[in-house]
Image (cartoon, rainbow, N blue to C red):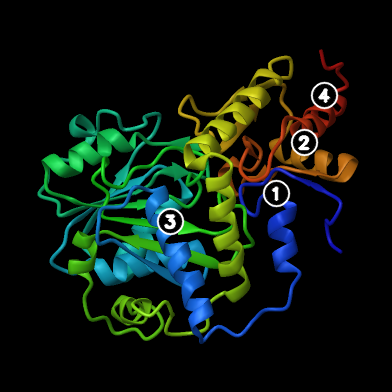
């Protein structure tokens, strides 16, 4: 099988646990029955608890990628009467800008650099906005924003706050109630450490009130909310991934809850970062999440050559960047079923690639 025996440090898909892999190897069951409705309800309950969602919140399950979740939120929750402030600090922030433009949502392309927006109240354009949109962890460059500051800003300015938490859920703190978040987009293949193909949109009561009639069949939230009352989706869900999600949420709870999972990711990230100090690499941003580390070579090497060298010579996969940053940065994920022993394989490969002895 392709890449079966490779060590994977990419920010989605990520390393999965044996327990979850075993579920994926089983026959997919029929799903239009009470037993599967119970699975859906369990998944919804676990996700709502994980993000401390306000009472009355609901989860929409989409068989789709994370971008579909991003687009569907804009389609269903914003209108031409809105004015969205869209944080654009990389490729995924730019994607939200494109989505708003595609659906004719008035918006400002709020381009930011070298800040985690702790002072968004000072940096944001002085306009009358109705909503604030951010990719909490801008995965394209490994940069995380200050959700506490942004949530306070949204509350003080009466803004509906949309957060893409796709690459920071389970590894970095998020609290829907405390941070005044109206809607969260999450996906299966990152911190949740499941196969790609399932996206979840968590809607607060405020968001549910915003759901409108849209000229779209598949991404009509009203249809999903109606079907969700009986634990079903309007169209065929990613059945096996839903079963894996149910098991994964139970696994996280069994291991000490999401706080423990966040601490584990932090420990892994700190372990990796402490052990690369003797290599000619520097951190790309001072605002790093637990989920990932983005590195820039300082010895003139191309980042892409490092990525290819690790893959070809050591069967270790880290993540390249495209476009203008292709030769400048590469990314190392700390998401998923990571251990220090697993990370040691990457560290040993990196030191050997550079012809150095690891201390």
Kindly check if marks 1 and 4 are in contact, taking CB atoms under 8 A apart as contact. Answer: no
Observer-nearest residue: 310 or 32? 32
Tell me, for residue 47, which label it has, or none: 3
Kindly check if marks 1 and 2 are in contact, taking CB atoms under 8 A apart as contact. Answer: yes
Q: Position of residue 234 (x, y in %)?
A: 42, 84
Q: In this picture, is 84 found above or below 111?
A: below
Secondary structure of residue under mark 4: helix
Secondary structure of residue under mark 1: loop
Residue at image mark 4: 351
Q: Viewed as shown, does residue 107 lie left or right of 333?
A: left
First along the sequence among labels 4 and 2 = 2
Residue at image mark 2: 342
Give the class, few, some or many, for how many residues have Cα within 10 Å of label 1's Cα (few <14, many ≥20): many
**Alpha carbon separation for disc pair 3 and 4:** 39 Å
Specify whether residue 249 is in view. yes
Tell me, for residue 15, which label it has, or none: 1
Q: Position of residue 321 (x, y in %)?
A: 62, 45
């Amino acid at each position: 099988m392709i890449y079966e025996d490779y060590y994977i440090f990419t920010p989605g898909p990520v390393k999965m646990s044996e327990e979850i892999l075993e579920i994926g190897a089983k026959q997919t069951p029929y799903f239009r029955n009470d037993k599967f409705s119970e699975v859906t309800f369990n998944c919804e309950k676990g996700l709502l608890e994980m993000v401390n969602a306000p009472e009355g919140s609901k989860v929409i399950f989409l068989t789709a990628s994370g971008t579909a979740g991003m687009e569907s939120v804009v389609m269903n929750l914003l209108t031409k009467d809105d004015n969205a402030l869209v944080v654009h600090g990389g490729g995924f922030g730019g994607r939200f800008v494109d989505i708003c433009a595609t659906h004719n949502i008035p918006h400002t392309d709020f381009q930011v650099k070298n800040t985690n927006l702790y002072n968004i109240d000072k940096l944001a354009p002085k306009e009358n906005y109705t909503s604030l949109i951010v990719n909490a962890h801008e995965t394209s460059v490994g940069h995380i924003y200050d959700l506490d500051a942004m949530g306070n800003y949204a509350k003080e300015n009466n803004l509906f706050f949309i957060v893409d938490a796709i690459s920071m859920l389970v590894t970095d703190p998020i609290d829907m109630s405390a941070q005044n978040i109206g809607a969260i987009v999450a996906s299966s293949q990152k911190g949740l450490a499941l196969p790609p193909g399932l996206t979840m949109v968590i809607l607060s009561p405020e968001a549910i009130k915003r759901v409108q009639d849209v000229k779209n069949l598949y991404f009509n939230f009203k249809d999903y909310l109606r079907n969700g009352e009986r634990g079903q989706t309007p169209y065929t869900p990613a059945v096996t991934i839903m079963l894996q999600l149910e098991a994964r949420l139970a696994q996280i709870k069994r291991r000490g809850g999401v706080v423990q999972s966040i601490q584990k990711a932090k420990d892994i990230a700190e372990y990796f970062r402490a052990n690369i100090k003797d290599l000619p690499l520097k951190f790309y941003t001072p605002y790093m999440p637990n989920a990932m580390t983005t590195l820039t070579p300082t010895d003139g090497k191309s980042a892409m050559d490092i990525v290819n060298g690790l893959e070809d010579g050591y069967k270790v996969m880290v993540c390249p960047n495209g476009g203008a940053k292709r030769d400048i940065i590469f990314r190392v994920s700390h998401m998923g079923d990571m251990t220090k022993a697993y990370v040691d394989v990457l560290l040993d490969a990196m030191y050997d690639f550079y012809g150095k002895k690891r201390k």
